[in-house]
Image (spheres, grey):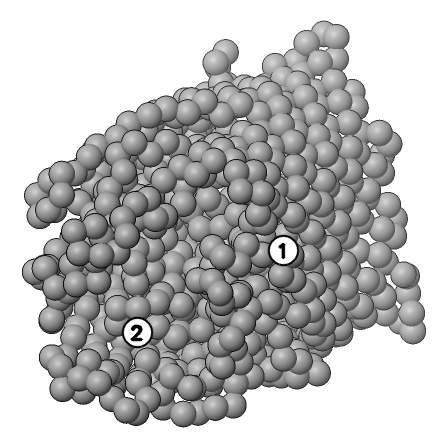
């Protein structure tokens, strides 16, 4: 079966160069905005959309959220989702080294696998682009496809909600959500100008990556604005602190790797009058990686089936078309009305070749695809009473339908199987929902109840699938209640109760695999229930002249958590194979707190001195077994010193990662006893960065990361690694490296 092609074919690698050439002759001087030398992290005194599904000041939301704005994306040289999470409390991204083989282990197959928010990861975190859901991750047996369907070069702002989001967004928002807001023409068009844009290029030493991007925006007339943005990048594998370059399983240096990618964003904004605004968006992202899997090569003496060479090639692409229409009916039932219609295709492919000693060579060619139609109608109404109360009512309908398919083919299939085959049946996953939120505002108080009712269906297609394919349906009610009290003009406190849920996916319900020679199999489970959560959070915000401060504490209980590939029977012998299945395992509790903000120390020698900071700590326990939850990251402290002048700024950041000790790990669920899980020691690293505003329209950003060349590990990358392993250095993070970028506005 041919791998699905993108919606459009074009030579993307050439487009940014053409855009950059077009930008060069028309670069004009512009005044440096005052916020260019503003201090510290974003204080959230800006409009966000993810917290309430409508535009609202971040400080007015009774929930914890982070905003990474365009200035922070540029100055931090944030290139991918891994970079985006590095300064956010209780947020991380897994990026394990590519150390897998054809049929064993999935370490590093999924690249930047996805976000972990407050101890939950994978598909329990909802990811969106402009409010449109992106594909889920797919992990089954040795296959793993991650969720890095983004190009930060197309992104103007990232909004992160920490805590359940199901009351507004439905399934998958158990832990929170991350919404990537793409560029708009207005972001680049100054008042009175009909053309504007930006060109940029950069280098990062952690993967020897280079990138080039450009954006052009224009105003055709008073009705029509347009935008075209693109970026290409090239790189190698992520560096580590390993020193063994052996071409076999002893290797600790990264396997040779080549990465390349491209992206395109096009927007047409039409404002015909009468309060209408129509935005047509096309977005395309594709990424490719090739690996020489030296770490999969066997050491002598060789058996017949020993691997003597192995290569892998992976691709990932996503394309979407979206129509976003906004109206101002000014009617009794709505002041504002929004309709969204979006169609998205996404696909992942992994091709692995294995050259074996004397046994037949093997090939695995695996694809996973999603095609999604998403529609939404949402209305807002503001009501004001004579007594001083006001209400902002938000209500709407959501509908999502996704066609999920997979296929595996190749050479020399497992005993008892014939290629091509499916690991789960082609499936139609659909969800329809109605939601309502009512914000009551009176003087210093805001009280916001809300509820969402979801109905989901999973309909499997039996064709091409050996076991009996099961369908599944269900519903979920997700209430929430938020309270915000403005104690003084500088201080506010908030609290919220929120519930979340995640419906089972096609692979969990119908995943099947059988190895008749090793006597084990994975079977479907049509009786799976949705995962559920109930969470309480309290917090405070301070907005003083010199200090911005956000503090939050949270606790949540989770039930019906789904554990994939749990052993449910069998002895692993002929006639009684070991049986694995996705099952609901019981309850868990997660609690923690977060502190973030910035202290402005005032003017020093003509510049402003400030100290940004963030700290997050989470603890979790499986209430069924009493053991710790392994998905919980160790506590992390970010502490910086920033000196800013009108022409340049300099910043030094210390990042302390606490240890992951044996008492915080359920070792037996990660490695087979008597082996024990590798524990991660504490580590502190330093990053030095700065920006030089060469001209009013030209900026140079540079940084030296891991300034002291510290060897350290991230916990999420080493889960499942034995303490007795001789290749632990292969899992270390990059040592000292340089990053630099040049940005020009016009």
Foreground residue, 615 or 690? 615
As helix, strand or loop, the secondary structure at mark 1 comes to helix
Residue 318 is situated, as x and y percent measured from the top left of the image, at: 31, 56
| Rendered location of residue 506, percent (x, y) | 27, 42
Residue at x-position 28% and y-position 27%: 473
Reading the image, the residue beneath label 2 is 101
Label 1 with label 2: CB-CB less than 8 Å: no
- Residue 37 visible (yes or no): no
Of residues 411 and 601, the one nearer the viewer is 411
Q: What x and y, as percent, mark residue 617?
A: 69, 51
Q: Give the residue displayed 68% in from the left and 9% down from the top.
A: 385
Of 697 and 112, which appears nearest the observer? 112
Q: Specify whether 406 is left or right of 561.
A: left
Q: Is residue 267 left or right of residue 746?
A: left
Q: What SS does tag 2 mark?
A: loop
Quarter of the image where one finds residue 100: bottom left
């Amino acid at each position: 079966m041919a791998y699905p092609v993108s919606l459009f074919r074009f030579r993307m690698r050439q487009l940014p160069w053409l855009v950059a050439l077009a930008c060069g002759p028309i670069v004009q001087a512009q005044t440096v905005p005052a916020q260019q030398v503003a201090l510290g992290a974003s204080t959230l005194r800006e409009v966000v959309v993810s917290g309430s599904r409508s535009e609202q000041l971040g400080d007015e939301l009774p929930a914890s959220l982070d905003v990474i704005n365009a200035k922070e994306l540029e100055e931090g040289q944030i290139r991918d989702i891994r970079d985006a999470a590095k300064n956010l409390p209780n947020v991380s991204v897994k990026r394990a080294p590519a150390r897998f083989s054809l049929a064993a282990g999935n370490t590093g197959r999924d690249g930047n696998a996805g976000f972990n928010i407050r101890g939950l990861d994978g598909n329990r975190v909802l990811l969106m682009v402009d409010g449109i859901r992106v594909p889920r991750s797919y992990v089954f047996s040795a296959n793993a496809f991650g969720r890095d369907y983004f190009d930060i070069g197309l992104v103007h702002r990232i909004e992160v909600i920490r805590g359940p989001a199901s009351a507004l967004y439905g399934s998958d928002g158990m832990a929170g959500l991350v919404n990537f807001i793409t560029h708009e023409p207005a972001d680049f068009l100054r008042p009175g100008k009909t053309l504007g844009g930006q060109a940029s290029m950069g280098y990062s030493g952690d993967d020897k990556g280079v990138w080039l991007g450009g954006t052009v925006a224009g105003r055709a007339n008073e009705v029509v604005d347009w935008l075209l943005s693109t970026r290409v990048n090239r790189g190698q594998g992520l560096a580590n602190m390993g020193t063994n370059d052996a071409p076999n399983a002893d290797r600790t240096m990264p396997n040779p790797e080549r990465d390349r990618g491209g992206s395109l964003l096009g927007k047409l904004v039409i404002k015909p009058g009468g309060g209408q605004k129509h935005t047509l968006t096309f977005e395309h992202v594709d990424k490719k990686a090739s690996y020489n899997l030296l770490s999969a090569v066997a050491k002598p003496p060789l058996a017949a089936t020993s691997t003597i060479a192995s290569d892998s090639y992976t691709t990932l692409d996503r394309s979407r078309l979206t129509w976003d229409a906004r109206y101002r009916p000014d009617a009794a039932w709505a002041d504002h009305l929004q309709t969204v219609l979006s169609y998205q295709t996404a696909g992942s492919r992994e091709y692995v070749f294995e050259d074996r000693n004397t046994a037949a060579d093997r090939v695995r060619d695996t694809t996973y695809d999603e095609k999604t139609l998403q529609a939404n109608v949402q209305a807002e109404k503001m009501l004001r009473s004579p007594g001083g109360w006001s209400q902002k009512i938000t209500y709407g309908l959501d509908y999502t339908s996704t066609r999920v398919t997979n296929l595996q083919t190749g050479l020399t299939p497992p005993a008892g199987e014939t290629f091509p085959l499916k690991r789960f049946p082609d499936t139609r996953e659909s969800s329809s929902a109605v939601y309502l939120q009512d914000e009551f505002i009176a003087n210093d108080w805001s009280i916001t109840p809300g509820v969402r009712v979801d109905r989901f269906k999973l309909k499997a297609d039996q064709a091409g699938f050996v076991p009996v394919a099961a369908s599944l349906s269900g519903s979920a009610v997700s209430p929430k209640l938020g309270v915000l009290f403005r104690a003084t003009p500088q201080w506010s406190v908030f609290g919220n109760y929120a519930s979340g849920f995640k419906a089972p996916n096609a692979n969990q319900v119908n995943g099947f695999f059988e190895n008749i020679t090793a006597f084990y199999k994975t079977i479907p489970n049509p009786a799976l229930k949705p995962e559920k959560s109930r969470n309480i959070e309290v917090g405070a915000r301070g907005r003083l002249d010199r200090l911005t401060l956000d503090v939050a504490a949270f606790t949540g209980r989770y039930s019906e958590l789904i554990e994939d590939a749990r052993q449910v029977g069998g002895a692993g012998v002929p006639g009684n194979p070991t049986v694995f299945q996705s099952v609901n395992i019981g309850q868990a509790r997660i609690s923690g707190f977060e502190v973030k903000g910035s202290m402005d120390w005032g003017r020093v020698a003509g510049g402003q001195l400030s100290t940004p900071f963030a700290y997050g700590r989470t603890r979790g326990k499986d209430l069924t077994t009493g053991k710790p939850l392994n998905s919980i990251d160790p506590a992390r402290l970010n502490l910086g010193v920033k000196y800013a002048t009108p022409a340049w700024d300099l910043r030094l950041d210390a990042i302390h990662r606490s240890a992951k000790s044996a008492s915080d790990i359920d070792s037996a669920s990660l490695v087979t006893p008597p082996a024990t899980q590798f524990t991660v020691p504490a580590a502190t690293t330093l990053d030095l960065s700065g920006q030089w505003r060469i001209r009013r329209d030209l900026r140079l950003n540079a940084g030296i990361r891991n300034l002291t060349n510290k060897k350290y590990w991230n916990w999420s990358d080493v889960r499942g690694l034995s303490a007795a392993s001789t290749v632990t250095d292969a899992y270390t993070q990059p040592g000292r490296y340089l990053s630099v970028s040049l940005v020009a506005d016009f």
